[in-house]
Image (cartoon, grey):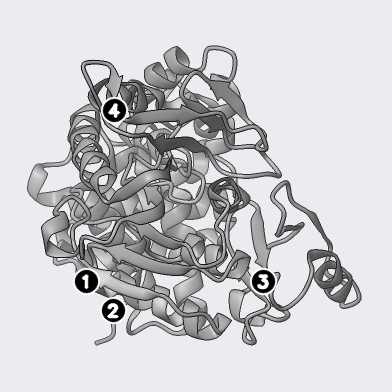
Amino acid sequence: MKKSVRAHAAEVIDALQNQQSNLDVLIRKHSRTLAENEKKFLQSVCYGICREWFHIQEIESLLLDKPLKARDQILSSIVRCGIYELGWMGSKEHAVVSEYVDVTVTEERPWARGLVNAVLRQFIRKKSELKMERHSAQTLWNHPQWLIDTIKISWPEHWEQVLVENNVHPPMTLRVNRRRQTRNDYLARIKALGIDAEQGSAADSVRLSRPLAVQSLEGFAEGVVSVQDESSQWASVILDPQNNERILDACAAPGGKTCHLLEMANSHIIALDISEKRLSRIKENLVRLGLRAELIAADASHIDSWWDQQHFDAIMLDLPCSATGVIRRNPDVRLMRSETSLKSLIGMQTMILDATWETLKVGGRLLVTTCSILPQENQHQIKKFLDRHKDAQLTAITNTPGINTEFGIQHLPTHSGGDGFFYSLLVKSEPSYDGVSA
């Protein structure tokens, strides 16, 4: 018997509650046997629940007489899926209740049919008041308390804007391949087709007023255009690749920056990523765009396993991070991250920074980026790096919009613009001994 799409949705949410994997991986896993319309439905439900996670969690607790036992947590996921559909998607009430009652049988909890039926019907009766009531900062902002507190401290003048932006749907931004067409020509091309769009802040970026299916994008198949957030596009602009330079793109997947660098200059790019599977996505993009790069699957922090002892002219280092600047694109980040995991990430960043710095030539430049808005991963990390490496010089970034921190430029997520992103540009100088240049 084929499992219903609503059963798949409940299983995805259950796995997220147990932090078994991230949302995208879980949706791909559960979409294998689904029709196209069911895949879209599954994504809508699961992404929506993540955006309203703490609010729905509170509603569920108000509707249940007592907490569910740990072994029956799948019932919590069934209830949350039903609440989201009834409260946010406007689905037909009778059909929703009936189907989620049936999911209890699929998930081998037939005794809970009456419980799920009663809870969802109670929600229908009290829907308006339950959706209006928010009893804590977590439910008001749909963020964990630790992250609310951290963002407040980090950005006292912007924290409310950041939390609001994290809860809305992100804009869709394109990168025009300047080797194939100018941005202005591409804008004219899609406007002639009735597509509403405008220039983005980065040189090759185009913002669409409404998202479109990637495969249906004008010029996508022939490599004229790619999907890439404009904050991410600024990274290649800042690094400013030159012809014939040897450039490392570390932690490169899925390859947006790799491809952008190659569109900007005839450089020799080595794209490095720890995941062989993710490197295949870079290869697909390179083929579609008609570009070439050397791909290596290895841990960037273990340079003996991949570096050929030839120093790089420039390095693009997009550090693994908390992804707190892209929560609107990855709403499960607020569930998967914690203060403990943040400390672990910062330690990993430190190892990768120190290792890749060794591979940069004297006079070479290293651009450190993250899709984080947390100072611990950004300006604090760079300050500590500079304290450890006396041959590292911070270079001012003057051509990029954003908040100028002491150690780099910070983008915060904006409604029609780019995601949260950090950039710090470092140049390697001659090593010195006791303060005297060698």
Q: How crowded is mark 1: few (under 14 residues within 10 Å), some or many (20 or more)?
A: some
Q: Which label sits in the foreground, 1 or 3?
A: 3
- Rendered-image quadrant of the N terminus: bottom left
Q: Which of marks 3 and 2 is in front?
A: 3
Q: Mark 4 points at which residue?
A: 385
Residue drawn at the location 67% of the way across and 37% of the way down: 399
**Image vertical order of residue 383 relative to residue 365, above or below:** above
Which residue is at a point 21% across and 16% down the rendered structure image?
A: 434
Image quarter of residue 266: bottom right
Q: What element carries label 2?
A: loop
Q: How far apart are marks 2 and 4 (CA)?
A: 52 Å
Q: Distance between the residues labelled 3 and 2?
A: 43 Å
Q: Name the residue under label 2.
A: 3
Identity, as a three-letter code, of the amino acid under mark 1: Thr
Residue 368 in sight from this viewpoint: yes
The residue at the far left in this view is 71
Quick check: 11 left or right of 204?
left
Which residue is disc 1 drawn over?
106
Mark 3, residue position: 177
Mark 1 and mark 4: Cα distance apart in space? 53 Å
Q: Is residue 208 left or right of residue 291?
A: right
Point out residue 427 in the picture as x, y percentages from the top left corner. Answer: 43, 37
Q: Position of residue 171 (x, y in %)?
A: 65, 52
